Image (tube, rainbow, N blue to C red):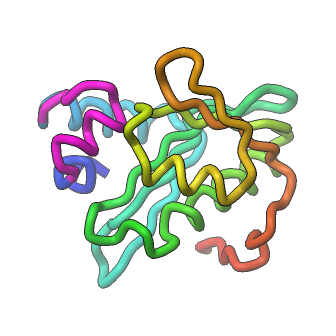
Amino acid sequence: MFCLLQRLDVQARLDQFGHDPGDTGLEAYSYASLAAAPAVFGAFIGGRLTGIAEIARCAPDITAILALAVEAEWRRQGIGYRLLLAALACADGWGATRAQLQCARTNWAVRQTAQKTQARINLATGKFIAEFNTQPHEGFADITPAH
């Protein structure tokens, strides 16, 4: 996870975290996330991690909190969308009825991905907040879980 986050350009880091945490901050985030997150999904191409979706918090009857990142050269190819669908399906399976994804207003890739699932969008806080229903969306049948 750290290697993928480290490959993000400065703008992508700003879009994801609201600031550039630097390599030390990205490494700390990666370790903390992998230790505490209920689930982390990865997209691998040629053995290289190119995208992640993280469920940062999830329990029945609460809003699951999601994070999403895709390496620049692999954006706009459906990877983020498929990772998002996998995270939503997992959250639904755990009993969460809603999920929320927050990022910078300038994160156009995530904004477009959220709109594909008809997320409710809120820009009032100065950030981009997408709220999703976790019930199956079109495309769920295309997700194949890893075993």
Question: Is residue 40 placed above or below 57 in the rendered structure?
Answer: below
Q: How many marks?
A: 0
Dominant SS in magenta:
helix
Residue 71: image location, x then y, percent = 30, 61
Residue at the bottom extreme of this rendering: 46
Residue 106: image location, x then y, percent = 38, 38
Q: Which quadrant is the C terminus positioned in?
A: bottom right
Residue at the top extreme of this rendering: 125
| Magenta segment includes 17 | yes
Q: Which residues are magenta?
A: 8-22
Question: Is residue 23 placed above or below 48 in the rendered structure?
Answer: above
> In front: 91, or 135?
135
Specify the quadrant of the image occupied by residue 38.
top right
Left or right of 123: which side holds 89? right
Residue at the left extreme of this rendering: 23
Give the residue drawn at x 17%, y 49%.
Answer: 9
Left or right of 109: which side holds 99? right
> In front: 29, or 35?
29
> In front: 68, or 125?
125
Give the residue drawn at x 74%, y 42%.
Answer: 132
Residue 46: image location, x then y, percent = 30, 84
Question: Is residue 56 placed above or below 112 in the rendered structure?
Answer: above
Specify the quadrant of the image occupied by residue 59.
top right
Give the residue drawn at x 71%, y 51%.
Answer: 88
Give the residue drawn at x 52%, y 47%.
Answer: 111
Residue 95: image location, x then y, percent = 86, 40
| Magenta segment includes 112 | no
